[in-house]
Image (tube, helix red, strand yellow):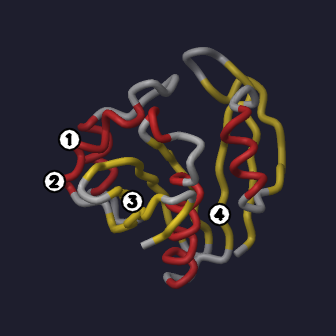
Amino acid sequence: MVRREGLTTAVTPLQPVDCTAFAPLCADAPDPWTERQLAAELTKPTSRCFAARLGEEPVGFACFSLIGETAELETVAVKTALRNRGIASALLQQAFETLAAAGATRCLLEVRCSNAPALALYRQLGFTQLARRRGLFDRPREDGFTMELIF
């Protein structure tokens, strides 16, 4: 349990049964994951996915790939009405602790250059920019930043 801004968020491993409830949380993303994609992610041996709940309500999820000492944040989503309330920060910090306990020493991610809220969050969490990659994202075509956090 993580408490932020008056909200107590429970962070647990995301389970296949959760996909129906959690996939819609990223529906407003430029390239949202479907329920099928989320379920497929959970079958990968390198996948580490985490669910955030307020009580029983699904409010966020994050999926990582863990290979050796490197975790890569594949996606993170928070329910639109609850954004900017510390849920993503709490979710990611708990995930980082779990990933570090599993042997990760760093986390990489890619983020759209225009995604100011995500960039602010990642910088607040301690990520540093490694590179700008031209045309990294589709729908719409856009540059992205590669960022790194050392645990």
Label 4 vs 1, first from the N-terminus: 1
Label 3 vs 4, first from the N-terminus: 3
Where is residue 118 shown, x and y percent of the image? 66, 41
**Label 4 SS:** strand
Q: Is residue 90 above or below residue 121?
A: below
Q: Nearer the viewer, mark 2 or mark 4?
A: 2
Label 1 vs 3, first from the N-terminus: 1
Q: What residue lies at 41% left-to-right and 49% top-to-bottom?
A: 60
Indicate the quadrant where residue 28 lies. Answer: top left
**Label 1 SS:** helix
Residue occupied by mark 2: 17
Q: Nearer the viewer, mark 4 or mark 1?
A: 1
**Label 3 SS:** strand
Spatial separation of the CA atoms under disc 4 and disc 1: 27 Å
Horizontal side, residue 147 vs residue 103: left or right: right
Q: What residue lies at 73% left-to-right and 42% top-to-bottom?
A: 119
Horizontal side, residue 52 vs residue 35: left or right: right
Residues at marks 1 and 3 touching, judged by CB atoms closer than 8 Å: no
Residue that protrudes farthest toward the top in the picture: 140
| Residue 116 or residue 80, whichever sits in front | 80
Residue 107, label in figure? 4
| Residue 150 or residue 84, whichever sits in front | 84
Q: Mark 2: few, some, or many residues within 10 Å (few <14, many ≥20)?
A: few
Where is residue 6 shown, x and y percent of the image? 51, 59
Indicate the amino acid at tag 1: Thr
Residue occupied by mark 3: 49
Residue occupied by mark 1: 20
On the rendered image, what quadrant is the N terminus found in? bottom left
